[in-house]
Image (cartoon, helix red, strand yellow):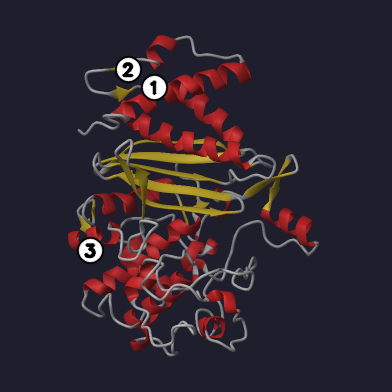
Amino acid sequence: MKHLFVRKSAVVGVVFLFVTTILISSSTGILPDNQEEFLNYQVAEHEPVLDDQFFDKTISFLMKLARYPSLSACIINDDEVIWSKGYGCYDLETNKASTEHTIYNIGSISKTITGTALMQLYEQGLFDLDEDVNDYLPFNLRNPHFPDDSITFRMLLSHTSSLDFDGIDYFWLNFSADPPFEGYPYPWLKEHLLTGGKWYYPERWSKTYRPGDYALYANVNFDLIAYLVDLISGESFLEYCQDHIFSPLKMYNTSFNLSELDIENVAIPYHFHNGEYLQINELVYMLDNITPPDKYWRMHFYPVGGLYTTVSDLSHFLIAHMNEGVYNGVRILKKETVEQMHHAQPGNQINYGLAWGNMGSSWLNITYSGHNGAIFGVFTWMYFMPLENIGVIYFTNGDPYWEKNPIIGDIAHQMIFNALFMKGGKII
């Protein structure tokens, strides 16, 4: 089995334990009895060790700082889940306790599913990544400032298409029904992206960067990708994902449609506002003084951020990406395709691959590969360390960017992320 943090990162583990111990002791006055055990550091193997009791107290404390009502998480080593657990309550009114099987909206992690669907079609030779998408679309997709420049599949998948700012006209929500929605993705995309369209706005296209030159993170790239899956596969995007990703990977509690899931097991999104936790419908009513919609996220751009799943289900998907496209003997992608997806693409200063992100620290010699997601009441992370092949998934039904002090929330989130990877170091 592979060791988790090595080299300089071992120091970070010790510092984390020390700082968190001070935080917990100063804020609660409580320290575990076995301090020597949870501060134990195996110098020979460079493995930080987290005592179970201390770890749970740490996560609970950091959740309070980040304003997370609940959190579900799992840790993966190579091709198996080695730890999973839930914390807090995913429904505050009824005090329903979260587990690894609680269903959450996962925000932009949905993009990795959407991109994987398109890359499966790429593997079949149905298109080339550097081919103009206009060869497949029923309308002419061009940046009006650079009308002679082609926009390719690779550009959409890597956010280098020169599509820019997701303005207010993009974030149209639907709280009362499940997809598919009438008029989406077509003709909505045409009306949104073409000059003179009903929902067009000039800021949608970059005036500075040509297609392929620079990464501008824009959600609408993945609305287009989902539509291309429709057109090229001959199946609806929803059916395609079910038939070619969710079913093969045994993701039985995963869907873009809430009506297909056990609604009693779905986490309610909360946002901490002026000292209290508000459901999304309550927040919308307070801010806009309109009739409160449903308490769950439903959005017309569901391929971009509308997937519901559990950490247990999504672990199957991440295991496949960590293990050259294979989960439990089932291959969803070729090894070469996975490598290409995870590799930062040309013109990409944000280190984004094909529907896949990368981040890390050159000083610590650490790289994380995966994706995260964030909407009001939703904050989710799915990353693995390629060198160690250790993965972490965690979902919450809150967000750390609460209004009074977002810096504290962000630090708390980062500490949870690091703690989960160190927890993996104890188990392996």
- In the picture of the structure, the residue carrying the numbered disc 2 is 41
In three-dimensional space, the C-alpha distance between marks 3 and 2, rounded to whole angstroms, equals: 39 Å
Nearer the camera: disc 3 or disc 1: 1
Callout 2: SS: strand
Q: What residue do we see at 26% from left, 80% from top?
A: 127
Q: In the depicted view, which residue is nearer to us: 367 or 393?
A: 367
Residue 304 in the image: above or below residue 278? below
- In the picture of the structure, the residue carrying the numbered disc 1 is 14
Callout 1: SS: helix
Q: Amino acid at mark 3?
A: Thr
Q: Are marks 2 and 1 in contact (CB under 8 Å)?
A: yes
Residue 49 in the image: above or below residue 259? above
Q: What residue do we see at 36% from left, 72% from top?
A: 212
The mark nearer the N terminus, 2 or 1, is 1
Q: Amino acid at mark 2?
A: Tyr
Q: Position of residue 335 (x, y in %)?
A: 18, 59
Q: Position of residue 368 (x, y in %)?
A: 34, 45
Residue 325 vs residue 258: left or right? left
Q: Which mark is residue 32?
A: none
Residue 425 vs residue 179: left or right? left
In three-dimensional space, the C-alpha distance between marks 3 and 1, rounded to whole angstroms, equals: 38 Å
In three-dimensional space, the C-alpha distance between marks 2 and 1, rounded to whole angstroms, equals: 8 Å
Q: Quadrant of residue 176?
A: bottom right
Q: Quadrant of residue 13?
A: top left
- Specify whether residue 68 is in view: no
- In the picture of the structure, the residue carrying the numbered disc 3 is 337
Crowdedness near tag 2: few (<14), some (14–19) or many (≥20) residues, C-alpha within 10 Å: some
Residue 387 in the image: above or below residue 199? above
Quadrant where the N terminus lies? top left
